[in-house]
Image (cartoon, coloured by chain):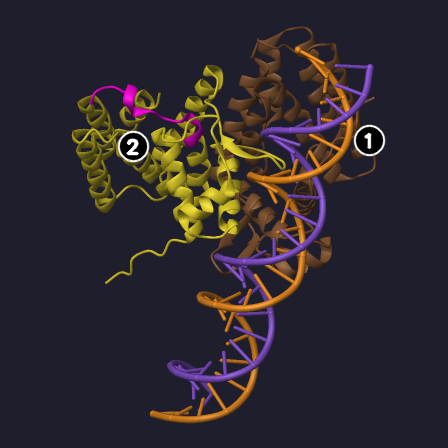
Chain colours: A brown, B yellow, C orange, D purple
Amino acid sequence: MLDRQIVSVKDQIAEQLRSDIISGELSPGEKLNEVSLTKRFGVSRGPIRDVFLELTKEGLLASKNNCGVSVNHDLSPALQGLMVEIRRTIETFAITQHNDPLNEEDFDNLDAIIGRIREAFKENDFTAVTKADIEFHRYLVFKAGGAELANLWYTIVLRMRMNYRRLSTAKDCVDEHQAIIDALRNKDLALAKERLIANIK
Amino acid sequence: MLDRQIVSVKDQIAEQLRSDIISGELSPGEKLNEVSLTKRFGVSRGPIRDVFLELTKEGLLASKNNCGVSVNHDLSPALQGLMVEIRRTIETFAITQHNDPLNEEDFDNLDAIIGRIREAFKENDFTAVTKADIEFHRYLVFKAGGAELANLWYTIVLRMRMNYRRLSTAKDCVDEHQAIIDALRNKDLALAKERLIANIK
DNA sequence: CGATTGTAAATTGTTGACACTTTTGGGCTG
DNA sequence: CAGCCCAAAAGTGTCAACAATTTACAATCG
C-alpha cells in the first residue's frame, strides 16, 4: 500500500492561493499582505513570504520592493495568443515523445481524470473543472518531460488564467479530451496532435 | 541626472549565483548550503533562502525538502531542442509586434550591446559574452512583452545553460546579431525573423 | 564480517523581534 | 482651499535563536 504523499506546508498554502486566484475569489489588482495570511493559515511570515516569491515567479502575483504583492492582471490578448502557441509547442512535444510511451495504466489514469472533469461540470464547480483539466494536460507533459518540463509548462498555464465559466459546454470539453485519448490509444499521433491543438485555446 | 538604479540585496546575490552557474564555477550536482553563502555574502540565511527558491523556480537549482539545493543538471537533448523551439516562438513574436516598434534609441542601445559582445570576445571572457548575448535578446523580448514576458523568456534561456566556449567564432556571433539588427532597421521582418531563428540554437 | 540500530553533528524549517521603508492622515503655510 | 510637510501607523526586509529533520558515524547484534 502506498503512503499518502507528504506535502510541505508551503506547497499547501501555495496551492490554496493559486486556487483562490483561478477561481476568481481574489481579483486582479487585489493586494495581499503577509500578516493577514499569517492569521489565515496559522503560520509565521516566513513561509508566507516563500509562497509570495513562488507565485510571483509563476506570474500570478506582482511584487514591488517594500510594497507587497498584488494579484496580477490578465495578460494582453497578444500575450495570451503567444502563451497558447507555447502551450501547443510543449504539449505537442509531449505526445510525440517516444522513449516512454503511454501504457495501459496511463490511459486508465487519464480516463479517471476525464471522469472527474465530467463530475465537476455536473456540479457546476468550475474551479474543479479547471483543476482537473490542468491535471489532464499536466499528466501528459509530466510523462514526457518530467517535473522539470511540467513546472515550466505549469507557469505558462497559470498565466493564461483559464476561466471555464465562459467555456464551451460540458459535453464539448469532455469529448475533446476523450478524443485526444482515443487517438493516442490508436497510436494515431497526427490525429492526436490535431485534436490537442484544437483543445488548447 | 538619473539616479543609479537601486537593486535589492536578493537580486544581487541571485545574479551572482546565476553567473557562477553559467560560467561553470559551480558544477552540476554540486551542493550549496545556506550557511556558507551566509558567510560569503555577509547576510543572514533569510535572503539566501529567497534566492535559492528563486533559482529553483528558474530551473538552475534543484531542491529537495529538508535536504538543501544543488546545481541542476543539463537538460536532455530532447528538452534542449524544445527550449530552442520555445525561444524561437517567443523571440519571433517579439520582433513581429507592432504596437511599439523599435526606434532610433533602441537601435543605439542594441548596437552598444553588440559592441560589448565584441569586446568580451576580444578578452576571451565567455561569461561576459553570454551575458551580453542574453541582454541583446532580452532587450527585444522586453520591448515587445514587458517584464512579464521577459521573465518567462529568461527562465527558458537559463535552462538552456548556454556555453559560449563551444560556440562559433567571435566574428560569426557578432555578425549574426548585427545582421538581425540590420534587417530590423530596414523593416524587413521576414529576413530578421529568418536570421533570428538561425541565431537561436 | 555485514547489516542494523541508535546517537551526535550538521543542515534546513520556522518563529518572533527589530530595522527600515512606504503609506496615511492631519496640520500648517501660502 | 490647494499644496506641502511632517509625524504616526502599517507593512516589508532582515536577523538571530529555536525546532525539526536529515545525514554521518560508531556501537551492537546476528
Q: Chain of mark 2?
A: B
Q: Is residue A59 left or right of residue A181?
A: left
For the residue marked with disc 1, what is the amino acid?
A: Glu
Q: Nearer the viewer, mark 1 or mark 2?
A: 2
As drawn, A134 above or below A17: above
Q: Position of residue B61 (x, y in %)?
A: 50, 33
Callout 2 secondary element: helix
The one nearer the camera, A130 or A40, is A40
Residue at image position (57%, 43%) is A54
Image quarter of residue B128: top left
Residue named by callout 2: B127
| Bounds of the magenta segment | B158-169
Type of amino acid under label 2: Thr
> In the image shown, does A134 or A4 lie closer to the viewer?
A4
Residue that carries the numbered disc 1 in the rendered image: A119
Q: Residues within 10 Å of mark 2 (few under 14, many from 20)?
A: many
Taking the image as drawn, is residue A106 in sight?
Answer: no
